[in-house]
Structures are given as structure tokens and as C-alpha cells.
Image: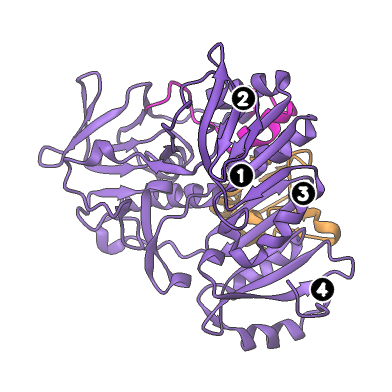
Amino acid sequence: MKVHVDMNLCQSHGECVAVAPDVFELGDDDVLVWQEEVDDSRRADMEEAANVCPMMAIRLED
Amino acid sequence: MLRLVIVGASLAGLRAAQAARSAGHEGGIVMVGQEPHLPYTRPPLSKEILQGKQEIEDSALQVGELDVEWRLGVPAVGIDRERRRVQLEDGSEAAYDRLIVATGCRARGWDGPGSELEGVHTLRDLEDSVALRKALSAAKRLLIVGAGFIGCEVAASARGLGVDVTLVDIASHPLLPFGPQLGERWTRMHRDNGVDLRLGVGIAQLRGSGGRVKHAELTDGTTINADCVLLALGSVLNTEWLSGSELKLDPALVCDATLTTVSDPDVLAAGDIAAVPIRLAAGTPLRVEHWTTAAEHGQLAGRNALLDPAARNSHVSPPYFWSDQYGCKIQALGCPALAERVEMLERSPEDDRFVAACITGERMIGIVGMNAARRLPWYRKQLTEPRPLEQVKAALAQESSTLGAPVGASV
């Protein structure tokens, strides 16, 4: 599955980092970096990351 | 198949329905909402929408093709727990096997002299935000009563629009949920941005002419001009409809860590209305009226409602909340408001970024960060329970990517 993050919306809350630190990370200057291609076995985690994003910036695509 | 009824169609309720479907629930889900709208997110109501950076449509939460029966614009008025039915205002009922209560809060009102004048606002829902935005476009001088999250964020938004702002609070510092010890910083921040911030004083009465508000008299006898007033006095729980249910209210709906009400294993609660034991507060059931808790509670309640009580999982993540003001991001984990003292653990040389530990009995029970987002994941791992401060400091000494060692003792 593909993980999209709308960087116009992201405000670096880091909630996704808390759910899946191996996929999401806050880099220097607090800017989010993430893996765009994630194994389907992680669907539940990715849904949770999208659901707890306060900015609703995360979108998943099959 | 279980019939699930969710009362409250905001963030917590929506996340509960989504989680139940994600977990494979194929039975019916009825979503009861007092407001006529599909679920929307509230944080922009005091910020981006007021500033004109977002439109109302942007606040809609993504509902997608969620398979639920919406009962919007029809408040629930009671529960018949014996017959397992929720009673709605229009006389209809919704039968449940498991019920999730997520009716949240509303803005606290004030009925003092002059409260009926035109130009006096509260802020909780979409209509409130739209009305306040319209008022601010014509306002010269805004008075905000209450310097909590809503009051401070609206002050920052209004300053950005060029409106003069007077902000009053009976407390000695603004933003008390971040702990009183850091209050001096937020006081400076608002004054540096041109807000006339008056602390230790409340509102006595509002006066107007032609039915419109013109002046406010404060409890210290001073009078200030204001053609627009926002009452930002906190919130009141929407629990009245539960008064005949015999569910335990104190004053929120008392739950165990699995979000199951202590009174009825078939009734769960989520979001602002739920008092849930918090590890960082020594297991005391607390309400956490913040966005992230509503989202997390909703997800967990939606999954737990499908399970037998013994199989349900506990909510464990520390409370997380934030505020954006004047381009500054303040973030908190845990229970800063319960701390006896704070201590700077990291601070940038320019003093524009920091992390402060909130401490009770030599244990860290929370942190407050300013412009320190990338440091939060590290502290989140520390905050699974009250941890001895010395242990945290020892771990921090091994960290290479801190903001810098604080110099001096001041916070």
C-alpha cells in the first residue's frame, strides 16, 4: 500500500510517529519524513496513524 | 450480530464507527448526533477558519463510504437500559446490544447582566465559528473572557486580523492546562503580540446601546470598550440526557481503563465525556478534553464494544494536547496541570525551543514543549508511567539530538 502525507496540512504533531516509528519520523527542523511504500501487513497501523493525525494529512492508497 | 449505537457524531463517535467496521463488525451501527452536520474537526474553528485560511468545508472529517445509519439533528434524550434502547427527541428509539456514549461538551455560558446583548459570542461549533468570523471582520475591539485554549487561540487569530484584543481571566496565568509554572511565558507572548492581557480579574457586566454590546465592566471596577465579546469560560458536559440512566456520573461518565462504564458492561464512553483512569495521575479517573484523546478513545471504544468485557483492551497512551498561537507550537504530554513543579530539560540557545518536565514527587508526569515537535516521540516513550526524574535525566544524557542543555534555573 502507498502512504501519502499532504505536507501542506502536516504540522508535525508526531502522532503517526508514535503509532509507527519505523514508517514515520520527524527529521531536522521538525519536518516529517516517511516511507511511501508500506507492506499490506501494516494496514491496521497505517489506518490508526491516519485516524490519529490531528490535521487529517495522511491518506492510504492500495 | 451485535447492534451498535453511538450517541455523539463528532470525532470520537466517528472514530468508533470506523474502528468497529475496520474490525469486521457487520451488524448495524446507528450514529445519533445533536448537530445537523456530518462529523467535523474542531481545532480550526478557533484558528484557520477565523483567520480566513480555511473554509467550513475544510473542517469536514473524511467519512468515506462508512456503512452507518445517521440520525443527525436529533438529540438523544434518555436511555432505557432494561430494554436496551436509546430514546431520541423525536420520540423514536434506537435498539442496541452495545452503546457508546460520546456526547462531549458544550461551551459554558454566562448569564450576567448584558449577556443577552448582540455581539456576545461563545465558540464550540461550526455556526459559532462562522458567526465570530463575521463579527471579527467588522470589530474594532474584541474582549475575550477566559484565557484558556479557546480564549488564547482566538486572541492570536484576532491579532492576526488586526483587531485590538483585551483578554481577561480570573486566574493569575493564561493556559493553565500547561501548568501554572510556565504561565509567565504565555503572558509575555500575548503581551508581546499586543494583547491587553488582564489577569486576576473577571467580568462584572456588559453594557450596550441599541441592543449591541459597547462596554464591559470588570470585577476591579475598570471599564473597557468592546464591540465584540467572546465568552471563553470552558465547557459543560452534555450529561443531562443521562440523568435517568443510573450510569455513574462524577461529573463525567466514570469508566475503567477499557472505556467501559463502571455501571454497565454494555455501555462504553469515549472522548470529553469519559473519565478514565490515567496512569500518570496515579490511576485517578480523569477527563481529557482534547482532540487526540477523542480520536484514541473512539477507536478503542469501537473495537472494545464488539468484545466481551474480559477481552477488552485498556487505553494506555499519555494524554497529548497542543496549541498554536502566533506561529508558536506548544505541545504537552501527560498531566502538566497536576505537576508540583517544572524543570527545563532541553532549551535552544535562542530560548525559542524548549522541553520542560512536569514533576510531582520527583517523578515526571508530563512534559510541555515549545517548537520541539521532533523531541516528543522520545518523551512519549518515557511517559508510559510516572518515571523518576533522575532516570529520565540519565537517559537524556545519552541522547545526541536534544535542543541543547538549559542554562540557568529559570523556566
Residue sitting nearer the eye, B219 or B68? B219
Check chain identity for marks 1 and 3: say if they share one.
yes
Which subunit holds the residue at mark 3? B
Q: Colour of chain B?
A: purple
Between marks 4 and 3 in the image, the one whose residue lies nearer the viewer: 3
Marks 4,3: beta carbons within 8 A: no
Q: In which quarter of the image is the N terminus of chain B?
A: top left
Answer yes or no: is residue A34 visible: no
Check chain identity for marks 4 and 3: say if they share one.
yes
Between marks 4 and 1 in the image, the one whose residue lies nearer the viewer: 1
Q: Which residue matches tag 2? A: B132
| Amino acid type for the residue under numbered disc 2 | Leu
> Compared with residue B349, is residue B87 higher up or lower down, i.e. above or below?
above
Which of the two discs, 4 and 3, labels the residue nearer the N terminus?
A: 3
Q: Which residue matches tag 4? A: B401
Cα distance, mark 4 to mark 3? 32 Å
Q: In which quarter of the image is residue A60?
A: top right
- Image position of B118 (left or right of B93): right
